[in-house]
Image (spheres, rainbow, N blue to C red):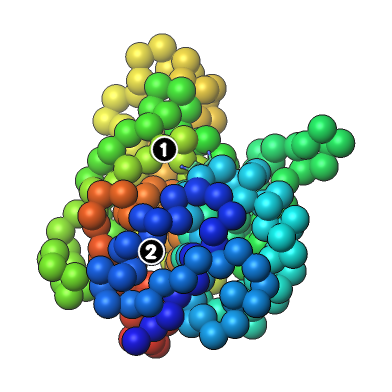
Amino acid sequence: GVRIGVLAVQGDVREHIRTIESLGGTATAVRRPSELEGIDGIIIPGGESTTIDKLTRAFDLAEPLRARILGGLPAYGSCAGMIMLADVIADPSTDRQGNPQQTLGGLDIVVRRNAFGRQRESFETDLAFTGLADTAGAGGNDPVRAVFIRAPWVEKVGPSVEVLAEVPAPETPPPGGSSDGGPEKSGAVARIVAVRSGNLLATSFHPEVTGERRVHELFIRMIRGEA
Ligand code: GLN
């Protein structure tokens, strides 16, 4: 079976471990560089990307992890994990010294943090998702129940990046128009919330908290070279 590391410096580590184990995989928490050895893939959980960034660097995990990902280690990031896999953050946070948060990178995307704005800070919706199989107990074409918690969206994708899911444009703009965060943050456009590029997969939402297993199942098939 596959052995998947879950970056365990902060965030919803347990939910990812549970989901992988329920699919018959082995999941191990990764807190130190030596724990990167022998894994076939890495999951970067949801949480707070600034904290995950700081602790990953403090634990000397950032450089070896970056190197492994560059070398082809399959990686899946949910929410804050998507931010960590992005090459560019549109609106990075800066620390007290004025240094912007960093990412591991690998995915040729620009993400915007907390992008859905105040009125929709957290929400759930059903999404069409490309490439899921029906081997995890739900039909491959059934929508994914997606939970968004102060979620990012993908603002730009490079040519190597495949869009797997979008939140459709709202049928009517929210009342007051820009009141939920400015014209950039509302408006009638679909928003990209799941992407894949080669061995890298990322979602703005948290399949690990709803019992949804097909996204992790897709990641396992990517690791096996079956998807
Ligand atoms: N807003 C968080 C961040 O910027 C992500 C939230 C999440 O992972 N649920 O890191």
Q: Is mark 1 within 8 Å of ligand 1?
A: yes
- Whole-Å distance between the Cαs marked 1 and 2? 19 Å
Precedes in sequence: disc 1 or disc 2 = 2
The residue sitting at 59% across, 75% down in the picture is: 35
Give the percent coordinates (x, y) of residue 73.
Answer: 55, 79
Residue on which disc 2 sits: 17
Q: Is residue 146 above or below residue 133?
A: above
Label 1: element kind: strand
Is residue 167 or residue 215 the one in the foreground?
215
In the rendered view of the protein, which quadrant contains the C terminus?
bottom left
Residue on which disc 1 sits: 149
Q: Is residue 207 above or below residue 76?
A: above
Quadrant housing residue 84: bottom right
Label 2: element kind: helix
Give the percent coordinates (x, y) of residue 213.
Answer: 26, 63
Give the percent coordinates (x, y) of residue 186.
Answer: 45, 28
The residue sitting at 37% across, 40% down in the picture is: 148
In the rendered view of the protein, which quadrant contains the N terminus?
bottom left
Residue lying farthest to the top in this orientation: 176
Quadrant housing residue 131: bottom left
Q: Is residue 22 visible?
A: yes
Q: Is mark 2 within 8 Å of ligand 1?
A: no
Marker disc for residue 131: none
Q: Is residue 198 visible?
A: no
